[in-house]
């Protein structure tokens, strides 16, 4: 199978800098979003390190075209190892440089190979699949509000506006072993994967995101632009990043 891709990041309306980072390589089949934290400079360093180190690790083990390995379990191990390697580097760097102390980042990615998609995910950035007009969230937010939500202790509406909505329970940059969610999804021609930071999903409802993705024949870059514009029009409280990967028929 083949895929087309596009990505866009934007500072938004309220922040001075953009601490999000993204990566997309259609030939390799690798797509990622990272949302850095720790204040100006530190967050930017963490998110960029996360995507750069993960990309390099995956290239080393899977080759430039991502085809060196075909065993699904092995590929999931490599993606987990890549995120853990990035985590170690971020922890070491923040221990060495006082200005970067406490920096961290989310990392959500998908690796497309043959007829499979391999998800890997830490934090509250998200991966969705849009198939036949339906938007499906494939990742689980590692956030305090989502844990409360899953236990039915708060409502969706409360979660959206909760003052602790930005507290995440898993991130790269926290010392110790990094637990990475991975899972396998099947691919169908026409599938559209959206990877995004919470600067999009915190401002724009899923139903509106689905409307914006439902644009047959529209260029992927234009759809990314429409998603970012929608988040900005809703207030643009945070940095906004959207990456799209479209499986061709
Ligand atoms: Ca964010």
Image: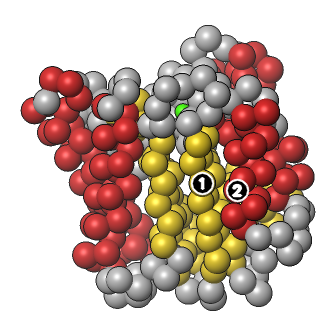
Name the mark on residue 209.
none
Identified at 62% across, 66% down, the residue is 6
| Residue at 21% across, 37% down | 91
**Picture coordinates of residue 220, whole percent (x, y):** 72, 67
| Badge 2 residue CB within 8 Å of ligand 1 | no
Give residue 70's position: percent from left, percent from top.
42, 85
Q: Quadrant of the N terminus?
A: bottom right
Rounded to the nearest angstrom, the CA distance separating label 2 from label 1 is 6 Å
Residue 114 sits in which quadrant? bottom right
* Horizontal and vertical percent position of residue 121: 49, 50
Kindly identify which residue carries mark 2: 224
Residue of label 1: 8
Q: Secondary structure at mark 2?
A: helix
Check disc 1: other Cα within 10 Å, few if <14, some if 14-19, many if 20+.
many
**Is the C terminus in the top left, top right, bottom left or bottom right quadrant?**
bottom right
Please provide percent x and percent y for residue 102.
27, 25
Q: Residue at x 41, y 67 (%)?
A: 76
Q: Nearer the viewer, residue 111 or 48?
A: 48
The answer to whether residue 159 is visible is yes
Pointer 2 with pointer 1, Cβ within 8 A: yes
Image vertical order of residue 125 relative to residue 17, above or below: below
Q: Quadrant of residue 104?
A: top left
Q: Residues within 10 Å of mark 2 (few under 14, many from 20)?
A: many
Check disc 1 and report its element: helix, strand or loop: strand
Question: Would you say residue 147 is visible in this rendering?
Answer: no
């Amino acid at each position: 199978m083949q895929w087309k891709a596009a990505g866009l990041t934007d500072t938004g309306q309220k922040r001075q800098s953009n601490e999000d980072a993204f990566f997309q390589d259609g030939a390799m089949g690798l797509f990622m979003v990272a949302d850095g934290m720790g204040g100006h400079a530190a967050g930017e360093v963490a998110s960029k390190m996360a995507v750069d180190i993960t990309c390099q690790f995956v290239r080393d083990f899977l080759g430039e075209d991502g085809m060196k390995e075909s065993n699904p379990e092995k590929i999931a191990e490599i993606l987990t190892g890549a995120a853990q390697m990035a985590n170690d580097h971020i922890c070491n760097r923040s221990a060495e440089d006082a200005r970067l102390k406490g920096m961290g980042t989310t990392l959500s990615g998908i690796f497309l190979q043959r007829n499979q998609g391999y998800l890997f995910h830490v934090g509250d950035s998200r991966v969705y699949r849009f198939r036949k007009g339906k938007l499906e969230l494939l990742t689980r937010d590692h956030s305090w509000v989502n844990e409360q939500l899953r236990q039915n202790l708060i409502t969706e509406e409360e979660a959206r506006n909760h003052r602790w909505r930005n507290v995440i329970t898993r991130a790269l940059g926290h010392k110790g072993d990094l637990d990475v969610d991975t899972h396998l999804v099947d691919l169908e021609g026409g599938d559209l994967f959206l990877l995004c930071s919470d600067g999009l999903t915190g401002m724009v409802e899923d139903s509106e995101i689905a409307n914006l993705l439902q644009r047959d024949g529209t260029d992927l870059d234009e759809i990314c632009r429409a998603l970012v514009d929608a988040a900005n029009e809703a207030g643009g409280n945070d940095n906004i990043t959207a990456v799209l990967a479209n499986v061709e028929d």
